[in-house]
Image: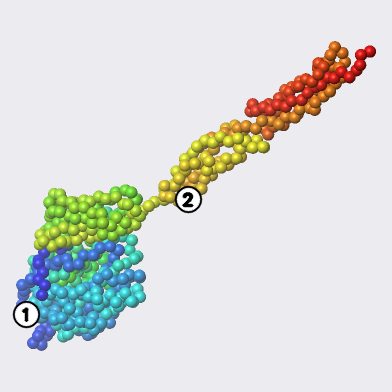
Amino acid sequence: MRRLVRREWLLAVGGLCAAAMVSGDGRADTVPGADNYGIGPSEVEFGSLAPVVTESGFITLSLDASGSNGGAYQFRGGAPGTIRVQKPAGATVRRAFLAAASTGFSGRRLNNGDVTLDGIAVVWGISTPSSISSWNHWSEVTGIAKPKIDASPAGIVSFNVGEVNTTGIDGEILAVIFDDPAQTTSNTVILLFGAQNISGDTFNIALGSPINKSDPNLAIDLSLGISFGFQDGANTGQHSIVNVNGERLTSLAGGQDDGQPANGALMTVGGIGDTNDNPAPFDTSSGPRKDDELYNLLPFLHTGDTAITVFSQNPSNDDNILFAALNLHSAAAIVGEGIVLGPSPAPDGDVGTTFTVTATVQDANGHPVSGRAVTFLVTAGPDSGDGATAITDASGHASFTYTGAAAGVDEVLATFVDSQNHTQTSNTVIRRWILRNSPPTAVCQSVTRAVDAVCLAAVQPAEVGNGSFDPDGDPISLALNPAGPFSLGNTSVILTATDSSSLSASCAAVVTAIDQTPPAVSCPLATSAECTGDGAALVTVGNATATDNCGNPAVLGPAGSASYALGTTPISFTASDGSGNTASCTTSVTVVDTTPPA
């Protein structure tokens, strides 16, 4: 048998309720769940419940109990001798565990195979005596439960429970932790097993991050598993109290919610079919359904809280608390000596920014542990392998900061070596790195362009936006306003760059349209004239003609009548446009003497 070390955790649950039995010699007890023969509390190896399983991630928890001597259940659904699992859609089993208790004051220790699931023998990994002369047992049953549950549709999945000498076994508790793709926040499940402390148990719960009660996903539920507890509306002596942070949560925990009102069938756990609506804190009227052992701890917490203390006690010392579960949504925690990592939940971050995780290390009494080495490691994701070691400060805190290198989801863990020289591992912090779509960067340059044959300049957006880019590497499109073509002179334009996600950026530039084309000029034809005397002739010369792509050019030249000397005289015409472009042509006037002397 594996011996368990007594420890305190930051969640306190102690004794709860009791019930009666049929004695080994056949005597029938008068009140189920009670110490009818005055046997009294017995020594226990394990003075209170201790954490045996801690899991974190996108997970959910299913809990159910079964207490049966073969008759019909008094309160729960399902057939006698069955135990149920609530399977979420698309979920798969991560781990499954079974707890069992022999009947109170029977002195019975269960053997391997005394309990079966669907006919498969359960082998106990932990066995410990309780304070009511019975034994509590624990087994990981993932290998039995997972194949059937994973192959089943969403909803209730039932297992047949077999018991050797059923009246000597009060019942079983089945806890199944699922990987649940429907979860959007990192959750934490802590399962505790052992035997109640007669004087009451105090549990110290350290949280990975300060409570934020505005978080719509936040939930912190406590489930208790109790055997040999009987309540019938008249028996007010069998009940237990639970306090949270010094305030009363319940005064009537216990009962046979998941069993029958008889020894060998007295079992309850806060799970399937129960609600976390807390009972009236000081109500002591009996009845197993007034307190279903599923509690909501949030009413006892305040924003900013980083720790929870829970205390429970069974005044009648005749019940058996063997199990507790702490189910945290959008939060992380530890119970007793251990390490918890925050922030939990972690916010998403942009690639290229830094992220800091902080570990909190506490001892079994909930006190911070200073001077202890904590090793951090990114175990999965784009930054897998990043890590560091840091030393806890006076508050028990140590931190690790790293930079997200790429888009994806990182899983970060922290470990330390505890007072028993065992390596303890924290919850997993999940950090989602996002490569956000950034808008393009528009880079403008002014452009000067010569006009064409119709005095307009065409400019492409890429010429103005030369150098524009998208920081994410997305393709971009460029557009100008106005789009052109552009008339002579300066035109202010806006360049807009747009990426594939329709994010855009703009900048301003100037498009300058210039005229570099000279006019086209045509001179009149060469002219000949007969000398009329004095070695000259009066000749009339026509004007040159000119055209231009940007309007009517001016023409300068010797058009009109003038006296030209005998011989050939070249003459020129020049056309000028509004941009100063010029063109010239040349013709001639020839004066000849063909008249003989008189």
C-alpha separation, residue under disc 2 versus residue under disc 1: 85 Å
Q: Is residue 571 above or below residue 516?
A: above
Q: Amino acid at mark 2?
A: Pro
Q: Position of residue 541 (x, y in %)?
A: 80, 22
Q: Which residue is mark 2?
A: 475
Residue 320 as seen in the image, left or right of residue 331: left
Q: What residue is shown at x 18% (from left), y 58% (from top)?
A: 415
Q: Amino acid at mark 1?
A: Tyr
| Rendered image quadrant of residue 359 | bottom left
Q: Position of residue 75 (x, y in %)?
A: 25, 77
Q: Is residue 597 above or below residue 162?
A: above
Residue 451 as seen in the image, left or right of residue 119: right
Q: How is the image coloured?
A: rainbow
Q: Nearer the viewer, residue 264 or 50?
A: 50
Q: Position of residue 555 (x, y in %)?
A: 72, 25
Residue 63 as seen in the image, left or right of residue 566: left
What is the residue that sits farthest to the front in this orientation? 596
| Rendered image quadrant of residue 387 | bottom left
What is the residue that sits farthest to the bottom in this orientation? 26
Q: What residue is shown at x 32% (from left), y 56% (from top)?
A: 382
Viewer can see residue 289: no
| Rendered image quadrant of residue 67 | bottom left
Q: Earlier in the sequence, mark 2 or mark 1?
A: 1
Task: Give neighbour class at mark 1: few <14, some 14-19, many 20+ (Cα, 10 Å).
Answer: few
Of circles 2 and 1, the one toward us is 2
Q: Position of residue 192 (x, y in %)?
A: 17, 67
Q: Which residue is mark 1?
A: 37
